[in-house]
Each structure stands twice: as structure tokens, then as C-alpha cells.
Amino acid sequence: MASVRGTVRSQRHVAEVATSQRECMLNLIIRLFMNAIALWVAARVVPGIGLSGELGPILFVAAVFGVVNALVKPIVMFVSIPFVVLTLGLFILVINAGMLMLTATLVDSLSVRGFGAALLGSLLISLVSLLLSLVLPER
């Protein structure tokens, strides 16, 4: 009897883990599309930002942008804590613009001409991402 309960518990645990993994993957895909939409809007609105290609290349740019923000940005934020504190957080705008410029350097489908375009683009990307996250809340 105890082994049957143990088997049922382990099956329930496996099902919960699978559901959790599916939700995590769905959130990742939603974030990828949110980044793609935000980048597309920035390319259409901000002069100096260009995004070439159809859906595939745009999704690739969004994925690279997400990886840059996940891996590089925390390191840059840590190193620049004194500047962030000194500027009362405004230096974060410069960091975001730098992440957009770095993404453009890594991917041929995205072009950013100048720091001003990167700054405006990063502001618009943040705004569009915020609005989309309000419409599509994380699960």
C-alpha cells in the first residue's frame, strides 16, 4: 500500500514538473515575441534604427537582444553601480542604449546609427515592452 502511494506521489510530481516546464517555455516564447514586437516598433518609429528581414530574422534579433540583456547587462549594471547611484538611475538609460548597440553589432539584421538613435530606441523598446507586459501578464 505504501509503495502505491509513493508511485502516485512520484507520478503527480512528474506531472507538476512537466506543467511547470511548459509554463516556463510558454513565458519564454511570449517574451521573445514581446521583444520582437518592441524592436519592430522601434525600427519603424525611430530614425536611425533599421530592422531587415521578415519574421525569422526579427525573432533572431529579439533572441539575441534577450540573451544580451540576460547575460551582459547584469555585469555592466554591477560594474557601473557608482554611476547609476551618482546619476540617480539615469545611467541605466545609457546602459540600455549600449545593450541595443551591442545587439546591433552582433546581428546583421539590426542596424543602429548613433547613440541618440540607440537611446531613443531603448526608451521606446522599454515602453512597448511595459505596455505589452500589462496586456499579457506573466503566468
Image (spheres, rainbow, N blue to C red):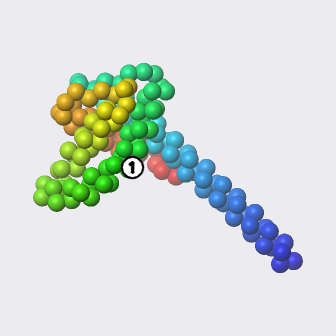
Name the residue at the bottom extreme: 2
Tell how many labels. 1
Asked where in the image residue 101 lies, by quadrant, the reply is top left
Above/below status of 31 relative to 41: below
Q: Residue drawn 52% across and 52% down?
A: 139
Horizontal side of 26 relative to 40 (left or right) equals right
Compared with 38, 50 (above or below) is above
Residue 42, percent from left and from top: 31, 30
- Based on the displayed image, in which of its 4 quarters is residue 89 positioned? bottom left
The residue that disc 1 covers is 70
* 125 relative position to 1: left or right: left
> Residue sitting at 41 percent across and 38 percent down?
64
Q: Is residue 6 left or right of 135 when viewed as pictured?
A: right
Picture coordinates of residue 3, whole percent (x, y): 83, 75
Residue 3 visible from this viewpoint: yes
**Measuring 48% from the left and 50% from the top, which residue is drawn there?**
138
Pick whichever, 123 or 3, lies toward us.
Answer: 3
Q: Where is the N terminus found, in terms of image quarters?
A: bottom right
Identify which amino acid the numbered label 1 is placed on.
Ala
**Depicted 20 relative to depicted 43: above or below:** below
Give left or right: position of 83 versus 18: left
- Label 1: element kind: helix
Instruction: Report which quarter residue 35 is drawn in.
Output: top left
Extreme-right residue of the structure:
1
Picture coordinates of residue 119, whole percent (x, y): 21, 37
Q: Residue at x 64, y 59 (%)?
A: 17
Q: Residue furthest left?
A: 86
